Image: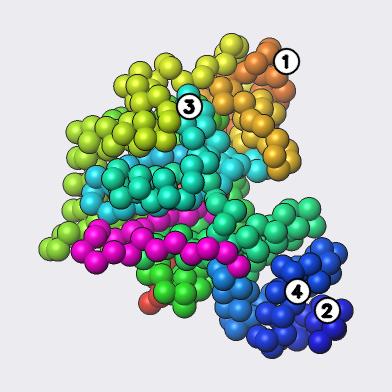
């Protein structure tokens, strides 16, 4: 079949035969299908979607385009990982990986960088002096076996087809496509060589999926696709109406993650971390339920065991482990400007998207792929939805390179924070997600509301 014929068929809503789609993908890898032709197919998929068979074909082509690791060893603890669909203030991975390691499982975690209003785990890690996220796969495997976890960037040897497709999606407006998101995530996790996966599908103002029905649909697609590819998978739908925790910005988020590893982090960050941890095999002990396991893991945080494991991980990856006990060693911005509440009343919303964009204004995020980020800048929030506030009270502290940078970010904060004269209704979206961040559990058996 000609490439143009295949594009036309997908454009018109027809299901593509597995052999034809695979030949098109193989031709793209071989340079026989041009970027503009692949871009046209991606746009057709954006509008028409993919059938289950088409999605499986695409995902397997991505997996088979590169190397595939294997962490499954007889008698060894299970190898597991977590993936988040992204958000603002989401530093869960920094807490979860060492916590899972001390809980007795192995975590070969490959993460990404921030883009747009959302932050990236690699950018946060690289704000730790000396920390390397670019170690080779052999060193990566050794650290996983010896420390229990390692946190690195995606290797170009794994799923290179996905890397090429994502680069095209990024410049053609086809990133927000559910089947393309699902195939990208699952192919990378299968290629990692893990046995089980927990997915944090964020929902709300600061998430890719703003509406619950979209988040639930994506969660079901991810769980089903992962299962077809041999991964035990569960997804949690979590709230991203307001930023997770209080810190937004790379070094600031590392500091908050360290607080959580010492058992003194924000309640919502700990809630999401423990909920994700107890979905993974090998973490909940025989005879325990998930609530009992959360209590045991919470004790590991408060006892400092997970913090010590994080310090060990930092040292093995070239970083300064003393930041775990002395977080003032992390990069700090030269200017700190308070942003004050413009009115008295009750906080009805702290819009995650605008807070994330305020951090981007400061240099904590990227406007385009490959752009460097400033590890020191960011925002510390002092209020949450449902709080009462007095006019002029410090509502946030802006960490910036200059006063002018700070004031540009503060304009965004003004758009993010909504204060009203009356207490917000308990059923409002912001308060509902704020009171309990984890709202749904999605398994191969179905959807379970939580809380």
**From this viewpoint, is residue 252 visible?**
no
10 Å crowding of disc 4: few (<14), some (14-19), many (20+): some
Numbered disc 2: secondary structure: helix
Magenta span of residues: 65-90
- Spot occupied by residue 110 in the image (x, y as percentages of width and height): 48, 50
Q: Which residue does the image show at 43% across and 17% down from the upper left?
A: 329
Q: Which residue is mark 4?
A: 27
- Spot occupied by residue 411 in the image (x, y as percentages of width and height): 70, 25
Numbered disc 4: secondary structure: helix
Label at residue 130 = 3
Mark-to-mark CA distance, 3 and 1: 30 Å
Quadrant containing the N terminus is bottom right
Quadrant containing the C terminus is bottom left
Is the residue 160 above or below the residue 232 in the image? above
Q: Nearer the viewer, residue 219 or 182?
A: 182
- Spot occupied by residue 133 in the image (x, y as percentages of width and height): 50, 39
Q: Earlier in the sequence, mark 1 or mark 2?
A: 2
Are discs 2 and 4 less than 8 Å apart at CB? Answer: yes
Mark-to-mark CA distance, 3 and 4: 41 Å
Question: Is residue 86 inside the magenta stretch?
Answer: yes
Question: Is residue 163 inside the magenta stretch?
Answer: no
Please state which of the two labelled residues, at mark 1 or mark 2, is closer to the viewer.
2
Q: Which residue is mark 1?
A: 404
Label at residue 271 = none
10 Å crowding of disc 1: few (<14), some (14-19), many (20+): few
Mark-to-mark CA distance, 4 and 1: 50 Å
Numbered disc 3: secondary structure: loop
Q: Which residue is mark 2?
A: 3
């Amino acid at each position: 079949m000609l490439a143009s014929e295949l594009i036309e068929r997908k454009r018109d809503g027809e299901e593509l035969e597995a052999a034809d789609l695979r030949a098109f993908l193989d031709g793209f890898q071989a340079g026989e299908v041009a970027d503009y032709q692949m871009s046209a197919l991606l746009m057709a998929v954006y509008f028409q979607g993919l059938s289950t068979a088409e999605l499986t074909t695409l995902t397997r082509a991505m997996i088979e385009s590169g190397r595939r690791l294997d962490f499954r060893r007889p008698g060894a603890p299970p190898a597991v990982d977590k993936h988040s669909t992204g958000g603002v203030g989401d530093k869960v991975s920094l807490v979860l990986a060492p916590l899972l390691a001390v809980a007795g499982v192995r975590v070969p975690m490959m993460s990404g960088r921030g883009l747009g209003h959302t932050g990236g785990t690699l950018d946060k890690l690289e704000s730790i002096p000396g920390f390397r996220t670019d170690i080779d796969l052999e060193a990566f495997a050794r650290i996983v076996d010896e420390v229990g976890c390692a946190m690195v960037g995606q290797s170009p040897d794994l799923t290179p087809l996905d890397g090429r497709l994502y680069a095209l999606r990024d410049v053609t407006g086809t990133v927000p496509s559910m089947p393309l998101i699902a195939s990208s995530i699952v192919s990378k996790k299968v290629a990692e060589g893990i046995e089980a996966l927990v997915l944090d599908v964020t929902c709300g103002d600061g998430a890719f999926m703003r509406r619950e029905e979209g988040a639930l649909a994506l969660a079901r697609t991810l769980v089903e696709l992962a299962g077809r590819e041999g991964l035990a998978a569960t997804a949690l739908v979590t709230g991203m109406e307001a930023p997770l925790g209080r810190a937004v910005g790379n070094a600031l988020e590392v500091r908050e993650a360290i607080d959580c590893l010492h058992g003194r982090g924000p309640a919502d960050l700990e809630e999401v971390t423990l909920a994700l941890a107890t979905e993974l095999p090998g973490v909940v002990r025989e005879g325990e339920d998930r609530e009992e396991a959360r209590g045991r893991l919470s004790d590991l945080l408060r006892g400092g065991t997970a913090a010590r494991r994080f310090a060990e991980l930092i040292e093995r990856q070239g970083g300064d482990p003393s930041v775990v006990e002395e977080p003032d060693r992390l990069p700090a911005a030269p200017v700190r400007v308070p942003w004050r509440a413009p009115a008295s009343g009750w906080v009805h919303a702290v819009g995650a998207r605008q807070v994330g964009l305020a951090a981007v204004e400061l240099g904590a995020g990227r406007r385009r792929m490959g752009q460097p980020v400033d590890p020191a800048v960011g925002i510390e929030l002092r209020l949450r939805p449902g709080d009462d506030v007095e006019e002029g009270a410090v509502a946030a502290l802006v960490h910036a390179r200059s006063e002018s940078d700070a004031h540009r970010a503060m304009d965004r904060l003004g758009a993010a924070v909504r204060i009203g004269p009356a207490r917000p209704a308990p059923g409002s979206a912001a308060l509902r997600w704020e009171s309990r961040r984890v709202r749904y559990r999605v398994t191969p058996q179905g959807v379970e509301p939580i809380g």
